[in-house]
Amino acid sequence: MNLLKTKTPSFQPYATGLRRQLLKGRPIEGLLDLHKTNQQMLGLWQPWVKRRRLHPADGFAYGFARDVQILRPDFKPEVAKKRCRGQGVFQDLTARVLRVQQLHFPEMTSYPQVRWLGKFTIRKMAHFNSTKDEIAFSLIFDRLDAPLEILDYLAFHELLHRSVGIRRENGRILAHTPEFRAKERAYPGYSEMDKKLTSYIGAWQFPEGP
């Protein structure tokens, strides 16, 4: 079977499953088995990686599986039990959102729930759910090298939705109103954020193999 002639499958199910297992914690024997399986999976994906056949979001998923240090000593059950929904393998979203809220929205007397989205996605990098009062981030940012300034900006953007609210007009839902845009432009370094986001996404679209 010629793998290069088949339709490129998604690496997302494997990478998200690997991430869940790491967050749950495992004894060292389990981590050794997981590490071996991960090396085998990365090898199977080499034909697509070398031919640059990955979807950009799968590039992030592959990059996570390639770079994660499965045998890190802090991947233990007793540590994993203490993790909240906003704490990932590398980044603690809850801490960042609370910091941004205290800095830019001191008038807010309550805090939203914070969590990770269930997949690596470049289409929805962050999202505010007003019904659940919840902010969620794409898994593409659960990386050791995720730019903190981007995480802070995305946290600000979603907290601004929480602050300004959503208008409904003629049956349409309006989230990015003129008021919202004006306040967003006041964020320090706002004019450079689109460029920095594009650069971050572009750098991981087609990761090199191990």
Image (cartoon, rainbow, N blue to C red):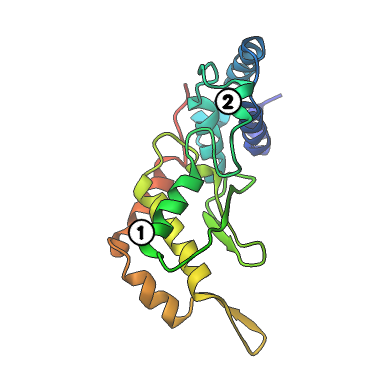
Distance, label 2 to label 1, CA atoms, is 29 Å
Picture disc at residue 24: none
- Mark 2, Cα crowd under 10 Å, few <14 / some 14-19 / many 20+, is few
Image height of 33 relative to 206, above or below: above
Which of the marked residues, 2 or 1, is nearer the chain's N terminus? Answer: 2
The quarter of the picture where residue 81 lies is top right
Where is mark 1, residue-wise?
103
Task: Provide residue 58's location: percent of width, then percent of height.
Answer: 57, 40
Q: Nearer the viewer, residue 12 or 150?
A: 150
Task: Provide residue 150's location: percent of width, then percent of height.
Answer: 38, 51
Image height of 153 relative to 161, above or below: above
Where is mark 2, residue-wise?
79
Residue drawn at (56%, 44%) of the image: 86
Residue drawn at (52%, 51%) of the image: 122
Task: Assess whether mark 1 and mark 2 are in contact (beta carbons under 8 angstroms).
Answer: no
Left or right: residue 68 versus residue 185 is: right
Q: Quadrant of the N terminus?
A: top right
Q: Looking at the picture, which amino acid does disc 2 mark?
A: Val
The quarter of the picture where residue 123 lies is bottom right
Residue drawn at (67%, 86%) of the image: 171
Q: Secondary structure at mark 1?
A: helix
Residue drawn at (33%, 71%) of the image: 185
